[in-house]
């Protein structure tokens, strides 16, 4: 897969590093060779406290010029929601050669495919953005 696509993982940085995980995830880590672009970085709150996607923001990964609009991308996360948000963000920046991995790491883990983890301490979870662990809240978006 990574030989055919650049894999963009939209999970929080600590999950990507293998230092944390969604409660329903069975394993820690990421797809070997994948790149992290947390989708929750592009969420905000309106004056009434409702969460929204700022779809006009340019993802940091794109600002850094780390990927070309010509290379094929595979967008993934844990279950698919984050990959859909990442798709919208990248699409709004002119990326069209993208595929959406709708089952994400759930399918990867079910097949017991390899994962890699970073060594070191668990990153500060308070730097994730406006979302808490939505999988741990029955799939409902929740504030920290």
Image (cartoon, rainbow, N blue to C red):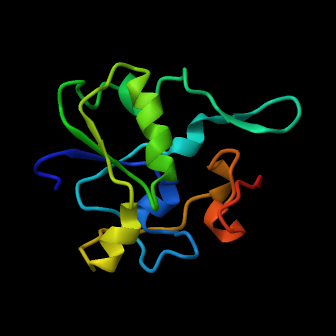
Rendered view: 9 above or below 116? above
Quadrant of the rendered image containing residue 124: bottom right
**Which residue: 16% across, 56% down?**
1
Residue appearing at x 48%, y 69% in the figure: 19
Can you give x and y, in whole percent of width and height, for residue 125 in the image?
64, 58
Residue 49 seen anywhere in this rendered image of the structure: yes
Residue furthest to the right in view is 48
Residue occupying image coordinates x 28% and y 27%? 96
Residue 56 coordinates in the image, percent (x, y)? 55, 20
Q: How many marks?
A: 0
> Residue 35 at x, y = what percent?
32, 47
In the picture, measured across the screen, residue 123 lies left or right of residue 43, that is: left
Is 51 on the left or on the right of 42, as rendered? right
Q: Quadrant of the C terminus?
A: bottom right
Q: Is residue 35 above or below residue 48?
A: below
- Looking at the image, residue 18 sits to the left or right of residue 69; the answer is right
The answer to whether 2 is drawn above or below residue 55 in the figure is: below
Q: Residue at x 58, y 35 (%)?
A: 42
Q: Position of residue 132 (x, y in %)?
A: 69, 57
| Figure check: 1 above or below 106 | above
**Res. 118 visible in picture:** no
- Residue pushed farthest front? 102
Q: Nearer the viewer, residue 27 or 137?
A: 137
């Amino acid at each position: 897969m990574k030989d055919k696509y650049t894999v963009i993982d939209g999970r929080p940085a600590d999950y990507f590093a293998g230092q944390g995980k969604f409660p329903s995830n069975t394993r820690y880590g990421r797809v070997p060779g994948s790149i992290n672009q947390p989708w929750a970085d592009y969420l905000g709150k309106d004056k009434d406290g409702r969460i929204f996607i700022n779809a006009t923001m340019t993802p940091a990964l794109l600002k850094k010029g780390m990927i070309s609009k010509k290379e094929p991308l595979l967008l993934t996360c844990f279950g698919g929601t984050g990959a859909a948000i990442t798709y919208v963000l990248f699409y709004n920046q002119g990326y069209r050669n993208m595929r959406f991995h709708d089952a994400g790491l759930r399918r990867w883990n079910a097949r017991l495919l390899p994962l890699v983890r970073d060594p070191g301490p668990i990153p500060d979870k308070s730097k994730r953005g406006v979302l808490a662990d939505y999988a741990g809240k029955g799939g409902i978006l929740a504030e920290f």
